Image: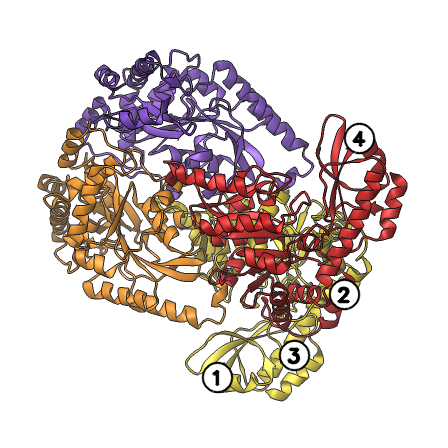
Chain colours: A purple, B red, C orange, D yellow
Amino acid sequence: MLSFESDYIEGAHEKILERLINTNLERLSGYGSDVYCESAKEKIKAACECPKAEIFFISGGTQTNQIVISSLLSSYEGVIAAKTGHISAHEAGAIEYSGHKVLEVPQKDGKLEASELKKYLIDFYADANHEHMVAPGMVYVSHPTEYGTLYSQEELSNISQICREYKIPLYLDGARLSYAIMSEKSDLSLPMIAELCDVFYIGGTKVGALCGEALVFTKNNMPKHFLTIVKQHGALLAKGRLLGIQFDTLFSDNLYFKIGKKADKLAAMLKKAFVDRGYRLFIDSYTNQQFIILHNSDMERLSQNVRFSFWEKYDSEHTVVRFATSFATTEQDIKELEKYL
Amino acid sequence: MLSFESDYIEGAHEKILERLINTNLERLSGYGSDVYCESAKEKIKAACECPKAEIFFISGGTQTNQIVISSLLSSYEGVIAAKTGHISAHEAGAIEYSGHKVLEVPQKDGKLEASELKKYLIDFYADANHEHMVAPGMVYVSHPTEYGTLYSQEELSNISQICREYKIPLYLDGARLSYAIMSEKSDLSLPMIAELCDVFYIGGTKVGALCGEALVFTKNNMPKHFLTIVKQHGALLAKGRLLGIQFDTLFSDNLYFKIGKKADKLAAMLKKAFVDRGYRLFIDSYTNQQFIILHNSDMERLSQNVRFSFWEKYDSEHTVVRFATSFATTEQDIKELEKYL
Amino acid sequence: MLSFESDYIEGAHEKILERLINTNLERLSGYGSDVYCESAKEKIKAACECPKAEIFFISGGTQTNQIVISSLLSSYEGVIAAKTGHISAHEAGAIEYSGHKVLEVPQKDGKLEASELKKYLIDFYADANHEHMVAPGMVYVSHPTEYGTLYSQEELSNISQICREYKIPLYLDGARLSYAIMSEKSDLSLPMIAELCDVFYIGGTKVGALCGEALVFTKNNMPKHFLTIVKQHGALLAKGRLLGIQFDTLFSDNLYFKIGKKADKLAAMLKKAFVDRGYRLFIDSYTNQQFIILHNSDMERLSQNVRFSFWEKYDSEHTVVRFATSFATTEQDIKELEKYL
Amino acid sequence: MLSFESDYIEGAHEKILERLINTNLERLSGYGSDVYCESAKEKIKAACECPKAEIFFISGGTQTNQIVISSLLSSYEGVIAAKTGHISAHEAGAIEYSGHKVLEVPQKDGKLEASELKKYLIDFYADANHEHMVAPGMVYVSHPTEYGTLYSQEELSNISQICREYKIPLYLDGARLSYAIMSEKSDLSLPMIAELCDVFYIGGTKVGALCGEALVFTKNNMPKHFLTIVKQHGALLAKGRLLGIQFDTLFSDNLYFKIGKKADKLAAMLKKAFVDRGYRLFIDSYTNQQFIILHNSDMERLSQNVRFSFWEKYDSEHTVVRFATSFATTEQDIKELEKYL
């Protein structure tokens, strides 16, 4: 069945599969100490233009968020995030499970605004009782956001500057980073992100890998004994090669960026298909996720031929739904969708 | 110096001190197994008209909240509270430290409204992704609230009914319970609270004790091996008598209620003193905490003779401050305050 | 280089890779809700002869141990394990990180003995202070053990019976389960294990998969909302298919068992090669891991041509080293090894 | 009834009660910011001859242990302790609840031996897999031990030196510190302990206070925002004066030391009473706890007139029991006991 349900409905990019096959019987040491992990790290450092970057591969996004946040925060600190941030809403309390409060601030179009961040920090330190409160110890942003929107270079710079002023790290969740960087509206490159953020991750799972995220510490700030910390979270794969080989492939011949660019382009076609037919957008996204407001009867009808994601109720008669493109989406898919609109 | 800084600026009610002296050399077993703990429990059960109540004494409020919430919730559950609830804002992340998210909902006059609670629960279960979210597993209210306001019998009944419909326990933080029950505006008695709530605590620290809260499980729902759980939190006093003797005294001759009544009455006098002189109330409280809006110059001047608590900024020229009465406040104190207004 | 370093030095069994390729572009829902996960679960239930089994796929062993143990224990409970158990020694404190103590008891040949278990339980409940101690809430065994040794049917039955008497679950860590079941010395089948244990996992990572373990609850005892719990630990793969497809393949045509049988047979050849040449065994293993005592000079010399694992110091002149076979080991490998002995 | 059940069966030393009464109506700020806490800290610094010491008052021992250990350790670290250490055995898993493993080593007479400590550390770093293990991040000793025994100056110096060599803090649990320092066999003074340890606590609960322990950081090593950390553990008393006043009294006129000296002396008389009548000692203690081996029939008979603590089974016919003296024990009590022997 035609499906735009998410960007993780297919397996892996064919080049990744090929590479897994070709290296399959090589005998490599475990836990990420193999040559492919090493090679992938070098390629990522180069792509980030950040030679001193320290990189660790982890299998999934929630796990990465939990490990980064809990290992960088002191026990009495929490992490500031937009109320719609993935860690705030959709990680089943993984951050709290590790002992830390997510300090939720209002969002706009899924984004944390520098002005809201500044206000939060000023208010916190002005509060006479702040020693009885959770101290803000980190800032979390997702790029693109959970609504497919993008931070501009100016917006991220402003946030970064506030973080430096308050001496707290800025962490960027790049589960879908390729779709952000390759968006026609993006003015933020990978090296800029590496410069502005203290730590971020380059998402693989949602960009053509079977699983895996590349966590990048940019300021000589990887916690000591990080491998032990990852192990303690149950997140250290014995066959670390699985992640190394995938990222080594994604960062060869710009594959990571090509996947994003193509999916963004198809998402733009998909958006146009809706807009041309008078459907309303919930938000104007320029990445691989598109949020459409459907009349409930249209939603019902369409769902007989196409799979997509329920997002949220809009009003009593309308629903917001999400269509996502991926590495495996084709122009043919969009054309087929158009037939049902 | 004249002080209305809080209701914990003095030691203990004289009857408590007397009792500690008179029992001092009795040789009693430790960890709450002594006769005074037993006697205090019986008196509290009687006062609650809840013969099946199970009671445990703990030294402080944040500790009680952490132990109750973490022991009644499943790991994947969080606790719903008003954004201004003590556990949301002023316990330094003690709930998150124990692994659970505080699910903050909007408040009105410091209270959680039944309508907001219902909306939260309906939205949660309507969300297609709710298995990826923190499940609401308990409702927390404070009575009186952090702003000195009170739930009416109707309001608490409505909240209780929703909790029963969703099969989640209702927990009431009664750090200042006496001041609520004895308020002229209260229509909620201790037995009603025991009936409507699944668990609550009767605060001692802020009602004339040196320390100590009486935790009451009303529905045969005290977690198994609760003593071990309390010990694991580091909260089991070796000399459990210290808590037992104090609560046995507070629940003899209605002392607990007399303390609340007197402090409420003096707080009403204090409020009148301000209102009569044209000062504005931030909120109209009928308990022992009064929140006044002072011009910053008035605040400055007054603070030279009287201690009170900064609460929050009101606007650029005004500040909200708190005046609290306690077991030890006298009419003379109010008269002296009036001289400075 | 010839390597017997571990059973996770190669990628995946070729049939698994084929299957990943053949299903790669099928569009499947995420988080384990796909048809391959369903199919794999049915096959595992059949192999366990346990129709009511509840199964969940998780990427690695430490993660599985942490999730099982923390979700089945009450907060005040710990898990009993042999001092050499994987959770006791080599999981970087993952169990303690989740809040629970590993209650270590003496081991014999890497095994927990029923008599030691019984003694621990009797002593615990005889202790007048046991309410101040961590209650034993689960028993953990690994089969085969960390030393490649096996529980007999009688031994596991005795342990199981004690667990039932004390009403605590028995959990079996089967990271290398195939090598146990298919050992020439084994009298424990998969259905027997499912009968005797309350929960266990069937290891994939070390038996030919890229990653993945199949967690089996056998007594209608999977914790409620287990998917949410797994997500909260950061352990829910978006592309759950990766695990489903692998286990569906492993449990087709007895592949899982064939892998174990072959590796055990090659390990026996390897053992014989050493024994025939007068080398001493540290322990007499009948599974895929062999522990040899090497003179340090032999170890040095051998390591120039063959990779193996340092295990522990034996005495000032000797070292215990481990040789492991895997799905990819060949007879040729053993013959090549013999040349260097 | 005559009782030697523990050193926490009575209330508080009379001087403490007097002081609580005399200061009762003074209006003091909360959370430990009052003048009595300040004064007590100064007196303790002087007694420790450690002007740079940082001191915090906490209500109980288990709580203190949990807070110290979890705030000084990194997440991947554990604490080394004797198998009989209080944190190992009798704190209901409070350390593990905070995420850390207690690394148990063999004990002798309740003590951790420097040689065992050194062996543990050498073996750990020699282990090729130590990155997969819990790193030793602190050493815990109790003085006197749980068996009433004492470290000599040489023994504690040796342990301290090893800790410095490995750059890990040495933490001394002084729940009954006075009884150690004032023992006739002691050659360790309070200033020596402050010099050799990085952090320790001076127990009040078991030395004449109603509750309370004085935690002392000796090397400018109190964790940042420690008040917030204490609050997060639910351990910050609103009426901090309760602890400050008690310790200010204990450290006036050497009261803390006088209490210990007197109780030690009475314990020596008690020991002599048993020894003179041919009873066997389980261990030769020179502090306020005495461990006697009683025939079960003697135990039964004696328990009709005297209370004492069951400690552990000795053999099928004998039991180890504990007799403790306290600030309130009198010579008359010992004489009365003698009548029943």
Secondary structure, mark 4, is strand
Identify the mark at residue B313; answer none if there is no mark: none
The answer to whether D336 appears left or right of A185 in the picture is right
Q: Position of residue A183 (x, y in %)?
A: 37, 14
Labelled pair 1, 3 in contact (Cβ < 8 Å)? no
The answer to whether D261 appears left or right of B169 in the picture is right
Mark 4 belongs to which subunit?
A: B
Mark 3 belongs to which subunit?
A: D
Q: Say if labels 4 and 2 share a chain.
A: yes
Mark 1 belongs to which subunit?
A: D
Q: Residue at x 78, y 59 (%)?
A: D252
Q: Please name the residue that numbered disc 2 is placed on.
A: B15
Crowding at label 3, few (<14), some or many (≥20) Cα neighbours within 10 Å? some
Q: CA distance from mark 3 to mark 4?
A: 69 Å
Q: Say if labels 1 and 4 share a chain.
A: no
Identify the mark at residue D296; answer none if there is no mark: 1
Q: Please name the residue that numbered disc 4 is placed on.
A: B295
The answer to whether D176 appears left or right of B8 in the picture is left
Q: Position of residue A174 (x, y in %)?
A: 40, 25
* Numbered disc in front, either 2 or 1: 2
Q: Position of residue B123 (x, y in %)?
A: 44, 37
Secondary structure, mark 1, is helix
Q: Give the camera-side residue of A125 and C53.
A: C53
Q: Position of residue D119 (x, y in %)?
A: 43, 53
Secondary structure, mark 2, is helix
Q: CA distance from mark 2 to mark 1?
A: 45 Å
Q: Quadrant of residue B320?
A: top right
Q: CA distance from mark 3 to mark 2?
A: 38 Å
Q: Give the camera-side residue of A82 and D206.
A: A82
Crowding at label 2, few (<14), some or many (≥20) Cα neighbours within 10 Å? some
The answer to whether D87 appears left or right of D16 in the picture is left
Please tell me which of labels 4 and 2 falls first in the chain: 2
